[in-house]
Image: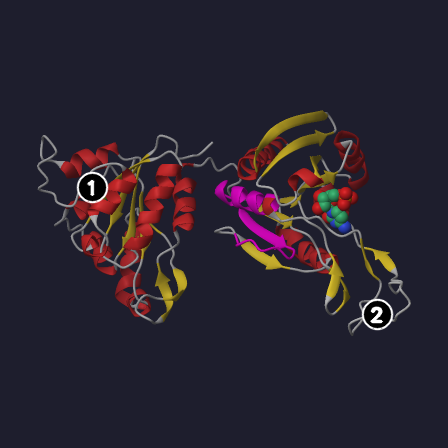
Amino acid sequence: MSELLNKHIVLGLSGGIACYKAAELCRTLVKQGATVQVVMTEAAAQFITPVTMQALSNRPVFVSQWDAREPNNMAHINLSREADLMLVAPASADFMAKLLHGRADDLLSLMCLARPVERVPLLLAPAMNREMWSHPATQRNMAQLRADGAQVLGVGQGEQACGETGDGRMLEPDELLHEVKKVFAPKPLLGKHVLVSAGPTFEAIDPVRGITNLSSGKMGFALAQAAALAGAKVTLVAGPVSLSTPYGVNRTNVRSALEMHAAVMSALPQADVFIATAAVADWRPAQAATQKIKKDGSGQMPALNWIENPDILADAAATELARSGKLFCVGFAAESHDVLAHAQAKLVRKKVPLIVGNIGSETFGADDNALLLVDAQGADEWPRAPKTELAQRLVAEIAKRIQRS
Ligand code: C5P
């Protein structure tokens, strides 16, 4: 289901230490089903060899515009006409300055100039030292390149190869993959805001203990990523999980059900869709002890008073936004048995238009899952598949439903 299947990508490398990341990116693109034609500047070939890039792309690499392998000796025309997309990663400050002027004194810049602008998008992934990045000349050049139709991507922040710390690191290969996929992906959620709750909650008993559950957050994170790919602005409210934030997603971390409730409710007024995948604890200790509870020799665990947590999904579905049809709420039901009956009961109890049922023990922590979609009309069984794929399918389904409503 990859957007990149049979897509032909020209991956251009200009000179910068971030060339090492382009090797991983090339491999990732090929794994996703794309064909990759690597074109390097001479400076790029100082950082990583064409041999490496040829081995990873399984194609001869082009460096020079005088390359006689092309029968008509017009590599710049042939290679740019074949492309579905051109991505220059890394795009050095010098390379972008050159592009800005429409200069074309090497094969890669020649190809950027010669590409059919209407049909072949050009993505530039800048990579440079923080001073070079923040220099007015670089910022001015990037603004003009955008105005000329290139998509100039952002940069990462952190420690740089030169030893300094700041903005200017090239985006990571998986982030660049997301940007490339986004070009080809259908965007049925463009202009929409999707709110996702994910992961478990943790209810403190004392400063060092609490109760939680085995939810890994993978399904919710996959949904957040898929919604971003579908063009939505995404807010992810995450319980304690060890997953990295999906690229392009705005994340708020919470711990307890009460914190999750507050974070969801404050984000809700901006949302068009709320997908509640979080496995929220049903109860919490009425009072968390301020000091560690010690054994008292009685052989018994001290009794705890439990009170019920608010039902975040039901509260969201009860808002005026949801009742007026402006907010579309989707719940998950992780069950141990009778998924259909429990999901149907939840549909009614929580007053939501769609419940997605699954078997808790078969989904918690797993990379794949099987789903049962339950609405007022009936049920639809989705067979076991990777969560990333199910998430894309579910996002497309939600988009269809909100367009209808
Ligand atoms: O009632 P139950 O917890 O089984 O319902 C599951 C659905 O309700 C999930 O979508 C879950 O995220 C949501 N939920 C919630 N707040 C709770 C409990 C569950 O939003 N306190």
Q: Is residue 124 visible?
A: no
Percent position of residue 60, x then y: 20, 38
Q: Is residue 22 visible?
A: yes
Q: Nearer the viewer, residue 384 or 390?
A: 384
Q: Provide the secondary structure element on which disc 1 rests.
A: loop
* Label annotation for residue 311: none
User: Taking 199 as reference, is 61 left or right?
Assistant: left
> Residue 3, relative to residue 159: is it above or below?
above
At label 1, the amino acid type is Val
Mark 1 or mark 2, which is nearer the start of the sequence?
1
Residue indicated by mark 2: 295
Q: Is residue 222 magenta?
A: yes
Q: Nearer the viewer, residue 238 or 45?
A: 45
Q: Quadrant of residue 307?
A: bottom right
Percent position of residue 48, x then y: 23, 53
> Residue 46, relative to residue 111: is it above or below?
below
Graded by Cα atoms within 10 Å as few (under 14), some (14 to 19) or many (20 or more), the crowding at tag 2 reads few
Q: Residue at x 31, y 59 (%)?
A: 127
Residue indicated by mark 1: 61
Percent position of residue 318, x then y: 77, 46
At label 2, the amino acid type is Lys
User: Taking 294 as reference, is 136 left or right?
Assistant: left
Depth check, mark 2 against mark 1: the one in front is 2
Q: CA distance from mark 2 to mark 1?
A: 69 Å
Percent position of residue 350, x then y: 78, 41
Graded by Cα atoms within 10 Å as few (under 14), some (14 to 19) or many (20 or more), the crowding at tag 1 reads some
Q: Is residue 18 magenta?
A: no
Q: Residue at x 43, y 45 (%)?
A: 178
What stretch of residues is rendered in magenta? 219-245
The quadrant of the rendering that contains the C terminus is: top right
Q: Provide the secondary structure element on which disc 2 rests.
A: loop
